[in-house]
Amino acid sequence: MLVLDAFTGALGANPIQRATQQSGLLALALLLLSLACTPLRRLSGWTWPARVRKSLGLLAFGYAALHLLIYLLDHGFSPAQMAEDVLERPFITAGFTALLLLVPLALTSTPRAVRRLGFARWTRLHQLVYVSVGLATLHYYWGVKRDHTPPLVAAAILAGLFLARWWGRPRGRGARSSRAGP
Amino acid sequence: FARPARPLGPYDTAEPVTPYRQATTYNNFYELGTDKADPARLAGSLKPRPWTVRIDGEVRKPQTVDIDTLQSWFPLEDRIYRMRCVEGWSMVMPWLGFPLAALIRRMEPTGKAKYVQFTALLDPKQLPGQRQPILKWPYVEGLRLDEALHPLAFMAVGLHGRVLPGQNGAPLRLAVPWKYGFKSIKSIVRITLTEKQPQTTWALAAPQEYGFYANVNPAVPHPRWSQATERRIGELGRRKTLPFNGYAEQVAGLYRGMDLRRLF
């Protein structure tokens, strides 16, 4: 999509800034979509969401990595600038941490990794995604200058997803499971 | 890009100017939307004629004047100025207009005048972005009187030899090239000379991020990003940001003895 935009000139007068924003937004959107899979499967009974979940998560990681790469490119791969940004600007700290937390998840996305870690440990590790997506949303919120509507929409979607997850959780005292009975 | 045929004046930069298309399609004018492309798309709703400007406050000749009359008072000059946005990008803008000092002197400031306050148009019909309370409308900016009387402080009515487009602040805007772009208020309807420092829009919205002075200063980072570098629109890399946006020689004297880290 970005490549297409670059060729058609749709990236506008400040293409690097636009590419930074687009890749970041795509990473967050894909992360939210990957988090929608489990509640969607539980609430609807469909199985296809479970099959696309991993791809969405990996794609989100890919765009987040691209987002960082463009940022690094933009700042001339300067380690000093990077360290200053990460350490002194909470806005960057949040975004950088969000991406760091996705690294172990991407590395353990294979069936072999699940077997090696054991399902329970793998699941616990992958709960890091909740922290990551929260930080990513915060990073988005802090990143806009004034109009906070889009990041608030993202936060509302995230809140909705957590709610759906809670609603559809297995073996809980939620409406669905108590109705389902033993 | 083609350099204008005339010789450069003492206040002009010799750097290549930003092409008209980029200078008129990548704009911050929140009254016409918060996306950079919004102002060009929505500028049709802004009607720059008929237009009057109210000049009042601490002046001996307060008056409301039609924009065409106001323009006819002064010979129009070209000025090629750098423009550095607080967001970290910059352009080179070939303005057409007249020095702000000429207008202020004509209004004869009283001894009490210490500041100049500028007010932009308030009209959600013409400026649909004002329907959202993103900022406190109307947009207000201000300068200290000595800053306003500096020969670099400029009132623009044209760009690239054409009438100023709506998205660039038609029909009358400020251009103070040593300050971040948000100081250069667009679509001005009122100029008031005051005794007290004006309450300016961005300083009200986020006082820890935007100060009254807003002088371009690579040594004072924005809380969320460094101001050490900038991207010139049309270039891919970044260049070093210069103190006072490269106008230190002309304007640094205005701030002698001031702590510009505190008064950012």
Image (cartoon, rainbow, N blue to C red):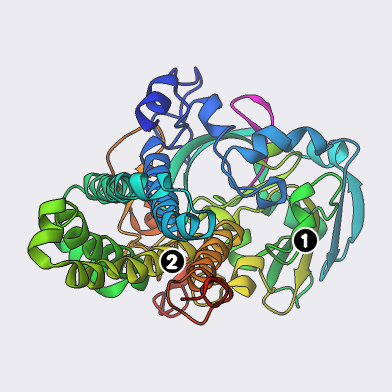
Whether residue B141 sits left or right of residue B223 in the image: it is right
Q: Nearer the viewer, residue B163 or A99?
A: A99
* Residue under the image location 41 percent in, 69 percent down: A134
Residue where numbered disc 1 is placed: B138
Q: Is residue B75 visible?
A: no
Q: Is residue A152 above or below residue B43?
A: below
Q: Nearer the viewer, residue A112 or A128?
A: A112
Q: Is B160 part of what is drawn in magenta?
A: yes
Give the residue type at disc 1: Pro
Quarter holding the N terminus of chain A is top left
What is the span of residues highlighted in magenta in the rendered image? B155-165
Q: Which residue is depicted at the point 35% across and 73% down?
A: A90
**Location of residue B122 with respect to A93 vertically, above or below:** above
Relative depth, front residue between A143 and A22: A22
Mark 2 sits on what residue? B253
Report the amino acid beneath label 2.
Answer: Gly
Q: Residues within 10 Å of mark 1 (few under 14, many from 20)?
A: some
